[in-house]
Image: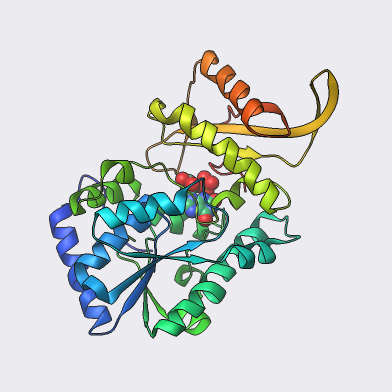
Amino acid sequence: MPKEITLQELDTGRFIEEKVRDIREAVGDGIAINALSGGVDSSTVTLLGHRALGSRLRTVFIENGLMREGEARQVTGWFRELGVAVEVVDARNEFFAALAGVVDPEEKREAVTQTFYRDVFGRIVKESGARHLLQGTILTDIDETVAGIKRQHNVFEQLGIDPQEAFGYRILEPLIELRKDGVRAVGKALGLPSEVFTRIPFPGPALAARVIGAVTPERIETVRKATAVVEGLLGDTGAFQYLAILHEDRVTGMRNGKRDFGLQIEVRCWDSVDARVAQPTEISFDVLKRLAREITREVPGVVSVTYNITSKPPSTIEAV
Ligand code: XMP
């Protein structure tokens, strides 16, 4: 288990200097690659890597078809402003093919992980000749995987998986001693714009972690639209994280005076410091009703919107 550096102990200047040196040492005069999802962790690693390696770090955004609305455009735009070129690789078909017929939560995670690391990334790394992959794994990812709660998308060594053997490249994880609050501080110190370093967390398996049951392009579109409404309405709560989940069960509703056996969306909004424990945010009933109105209006097929009032534990933040 890596040693933790708490926010109180963190000296961002020294941390950045040390990690830049470590990355340069590990990569030597070779090249490295990293996948940018636009989350705080991968955005921070991208800037750290570019500070260390300049154009010898190739940054790709994998369009897996599971991201939020307009994500690729927004993320590449932010980094263009920072002087970092980001390549977009369209792998939507591969991810949906791997997820077809998969309903078990752990199998879903595994399908996304294998498609990402072995198939899509494996191919990109092989073609590029890079020997190193730079990745934004943080301590919380490791905790939950090792505890056997959830297999986090990006954890290997702690599970006895050697990435060199499994995928053919080494993984460098400069943020591994930090938690989310520490990563935000490092991101800020590196010059990330505040709309990026204050972004709410988003899981590696992306919207596939928020669809219970089959993951199809249509069902992802449903949860994507609901997510846009939730993020729009809860953005000013100051909450740690807020999200929409598409349920598998249908319920009877009515639309235009007719019976409609429709879809259910669950909204979750969390107060938390580091995602290890979390409490549901006390949202006003007016806002809750607005969520219901807008989701049923904007998202085709939805007839029921619920709000989760359970804490973590026993809940978890994501649904899958
Ligand atoms: P959970 O759902 O385990 O989430 O309470 C803890 C935090 O980690 C984020 N996150 C993930 N969650 N699988 C997950 O279930 C992943 O691969 C993953 N990656 C990140 C999650 O959004 C929450 O902030």
Q: Residue at x 15, y 64 (%)?
A: 17
**Colouring scheme applied when the structure was drawn:** rainbow
Q: Residue at x 73, y 49 (%)?
A: 213
Q: Residue at x 51, y 69 (%)?
A: 159
Q: Would residue 201 appear left or right of 259 to someone viewing this image?
A: left
315 vs 104, nearest the viewer: 104
Q: Would residue 243 appear left or right of 211 to someone viewing this image?
A: left
Residue 311 x %, y %: 54, 32
In the picture as drawn, the residue positioned furthest to the right comes out as 259
Q: Residue at x 13, y 59 (%)?
A: 14
Residue 43 x %, y %: 33, 56
> To which quarter of the image does residue 310 belong?
top right
Residue 106 x %, y %: 64, 58
Residue 34 x %, y %: 37, 68
> To which quarter of the image does residue 257 belong?
top right
Q: How many marks?
A: 0
Q: Would residue 55 appear left or right of 92 to someone viewing this image?
A: left
- Above or below residue 113? Residue 292 is above
- Above or below residue 5? Residue 249 is above
> To which quarter of the image does residue 238 belong?
top left
- Above or below residue 261? Residue 200 is below
- The quadrant of the image that shows the N terminus is bottom left
Query: Can residue 244 be spotted in the picture?
Result: no
- Above or below residue 243? Residue 104 is below
165 vs 102, nearest the viewer: 102
Query: Can residue 42 be spotted in the picture?
Result: yes
118 vs 153, nearest the viewer: 118
